[in-house]
Image (spheres, helix red, strand yellow):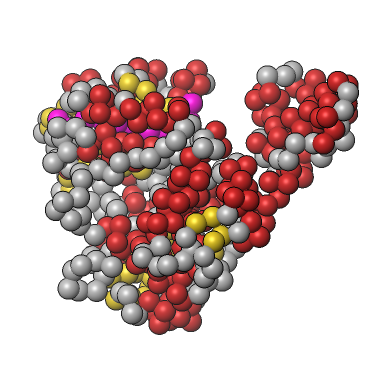
Amino acid sequence: MNASSRLPRALVVDDVPAFCQELRALLKPVCEVVLCTSPIRALRILRAQSFDLLITTLLMKELGGFELVRRARGQGSRLPIMLITGHGNETTAIEATRLGVADYVVKPFSGEELRARVENLFDAIAPPEPDMPAWTPLISADAAMKAILDTVEAIARSDSRVLILGETGTGKQLIAQAIHGASGRSAKPFVEVNCAAIPEALLESELFGHERGAFTGATERRIGRFEEAGAGTLFLDEIGEMSFAVQSKLLRVLQNGRFNRVGGSDNLQSRARVIAATNRDLQKEVEAGRFRADLFYRLHVITLTVPPLRRRAADVPLLAQHFLQRLGRGRATPRGFSADALDALQRYRWPGNVRELEHLVERFAVLHERPWVELADLPEKILRERESATPPASLKGNYAEARLAWEHSFLQESLRAARGNMAAAARAAGLDRSQYFRLVRKHSLVPNQFR
């Protein structure tokens, strides 16, 4: 928990009063809780008051949890956000991760688990101790990832723009922070903008600021993130989601450093280093006409491509143990994972990448009472994938049988990776669509089973 003398403040938003009261009772020992049963009113409260955490649910009549997150980010709030749901699935978890939600909690949960996870969020925003390094060193046992990390200090010594590519949850933000922390700008601000979480109509104001009266609701002047970054680093996350109109204005800043607040005529000068990240293939976005080619080449000075966790199997045991030690908060148990459990974790595809692994390990760190996490303790979806990934015994037969078994296994894996989308699976496999469809029928596979 924060070392501050006051209790941290959390705003809890849900349109079911009884659930709000339940959360207040559970969290009373660790923070001051302000309740709000209207998401629209909660946005006004966030503008008027100071909080350390926003807790909201996913399904509300007035405004859904995802939309509340987008609007909160759009009006400038950078609070850590916890999303609670009783109706979540893998898709909603990935969307929450994409929007930058700090923690995603699925009902049912115990009071002990909720308090521990909230305290972890408060600890994450606590000011660092004086002897702590400016940035957290990143760890990896994977050759491709280590090659990226080895370049961080060299990149940090320059002022070149950096474009970080990779799927959601792979650690793009951590790499950007590491570059900033190892640079001569480390004492200056590191300012992050999640372009996917801010409505298009508000993104220009978020980046460049606005003057009083520039638009409805602009009751006072507000500086943008470029001004806030000063001579530090501006991290533009999910830049592939930016509209063409805002791309044009960003291009001007990258060309000469000049910009204007919305509704203003003063020419302002930016000295910030820009690091951008996206989970999209920007080259293909340019070819499809969805991203400006001139902006792409302005950003495409130094490019780092972060591999997904499913291609970094060697990192899974290392990261799992690291998270267990960091999130265990000094508890004696659990001490680690059994060999079978680690094997299953390494075979799992991790659609949410490192962030998904961290959330899973946090649950064990808080709730697991035995010394070791065993195979049977893992979620069913991980166990299912381990079973399906076991090499078929028929590979030991003659060539024709082995080829047929390999073909069947390959098709299963490609369908699983594409979530049952036959066209996407065919592209990834490098096969003509009709040829791929014939192979799927030949092996009597049902694509819907892989969704």
Describe residue 241's horizontal placement relative to residue 386 as left or right: left
Q: Is residue 355 above or below residue 16?
A: above
- Location of residue 255 in the rendering, given as x and y in whole percent from the top left corner: 23, 20
Q: Is residue 292 above or below residue 324?
A: above
- Location of residue 40 in the rendering, given as x and y in whole percent from the top left corner: 39, 64
Q: In which quadrant of the rendered image does the C terminus lie? A: top right
Residue located 28% across and 68% down the image: 1
Does residue 284 appear in the picture of this structure? yes
- Location of residue 121 in the rendering, given as x and y in whole percent from the top left corner: 34, 61
In-front residue for pair 403/317: 317
Residue located 15% across and 35% down the image: 185
Task: Kindly indicate the quadrant of the structure image that contains residue 378.
Answer: bottom right
In magenta, the rendered stretch is 271-281
Whether the magenta-drawn stretch holds residue 279 is answered as yes
Q: Is residue 35 above or below residue 372?
A: below
Describe residue 187's horizontal placement relative to residue 66 as left or right: left
- Location of residue 437 in the rendering, given as x and y in whole percent from the top left corner: 80, 26
Task: Kindly indicate the quadrant of the structure image that contains residue 233.
Answer: top left
Give the tally of numbered discs.
0
Q: Is residue 210 above or below residue 51?
A: above
Whether the magenta-drawn stretch holds residue 305 is answered as no
Task: Kindly indicate the quadrant of the structure image that contains residue 180.
Answer: top left
Does residue 244 appear in the picture of this structure? no
Residue located 48% across and 40% down the image: 315
